[in-house]
């Protein structure tokens, strides 16, 4: 070991090496963004008013596609899910899960009962309720009963039945547009 200082000047970076480093960083960032968008989060535009006031027409949201796909989380009552419409799987719908497999669902004059108990629905304001009724029905295994939050304008399980688990492909998690509504979905 020598006590003499290292007199070798630091290697100067050239334009070409800077460009290579910059291109590598951009390529890695693009790959990460593509993986996140394809496999984890997907941007979606809300079309229609059936989920008001929670979600409004033309709002942009992110859905988490990863959480249900690999069993990291089960589909729970209260989740806002995106699924292929059972009547036409080329169409995608967004609704709130009200009944999970084994639940008995009934609607009496607009009041939702789950297993005989009134469901607390703070996300449905009085002006969005309707007064429809539906006879009690048990949710079959691997299926879910879903409703829109704007009950008087929602086409949902009351009309066309349950949603098979295999049709549910994402959970709505975050509003990103418009900026004044930006935030985590509840």
Image (cartoon, grey):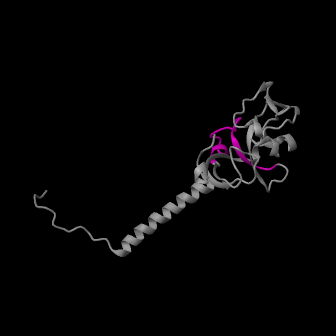
Q: Position of residue 45 (x, y in %)?
A: 68, 55
Residue occupying image coordinates x 72% and y 33%: 121
Tell me: residue 107, above or below residue 54. above
Quadrant location, the N terminus: bottom left
* Front position in the image: 183 or 105: 183
Tell me: residue 120, above or below residue 158. above
Residue occupying image coordinates x 45% and y 66%: 24
Q: Quadrant of residue 139?
A: top right
Residue occupying image coordinates x 77% and y 40%: 128
* Number of disc labels: 0
Residue range (magenta) = 66-85
Q: Position of residue 114 (x, y in %)?
A: 78, 29
Q: Position of residue 91 (x, y in %)?
A: 79, 55
In the image, farthest residue toward the top: 116
Quadrant location, the C terminus: top right
Q: Is residue 147 magenta?
A: no
In the image, farthest residue toward the right: 135
Residue occupying image coordinates x 42% and y 67%: 22
In the image, farthest residue toward the left: 3
In the image, farthest residue toward the front: 127
* Image position of 97 (left or right of 6): right
Q: Position of residue 79 (x, y in %)?
A: 69, 39
């Amino acid at each position: 070991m020598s006590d003499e200082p290292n007199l070798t000047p630091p290697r100067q970076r050239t334009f070409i090496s800077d460009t290579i480093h910059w291109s590598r960083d951009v390529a890695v960032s693009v790959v990460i963004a593509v993986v996140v968008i394809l496999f984890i989060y997907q941007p979606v535009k809300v079309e229609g008013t059936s989920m008001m006031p929670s979600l409004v027409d033309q709002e942009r949201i992110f859905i988490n596609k990863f959480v249900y796909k690999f069993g990291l989380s089960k589909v729970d009552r209260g989740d806002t899910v995106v699924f292929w419409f059972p009547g036409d799987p080329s169409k995608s719908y967004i609704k709130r899960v009200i009944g999970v497999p084994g639940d008995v669902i009934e609607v009496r004059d607009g009041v939702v009962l789950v297993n005989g108990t009134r469901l607390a629905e703070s996300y449905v304001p009085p002006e969005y309720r309707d007064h429809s009724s539906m006879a009690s029905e048990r949710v079959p295994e691997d299926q879910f009963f879903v409703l829109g939050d704007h009950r008087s304008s929602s086409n949902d399980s009351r009309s066309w039945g349950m949603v098979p688990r295999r049709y549910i492909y994402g959970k709505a998690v975050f509003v990103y547009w418009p900026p004044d509504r930006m935030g985590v979905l509840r």
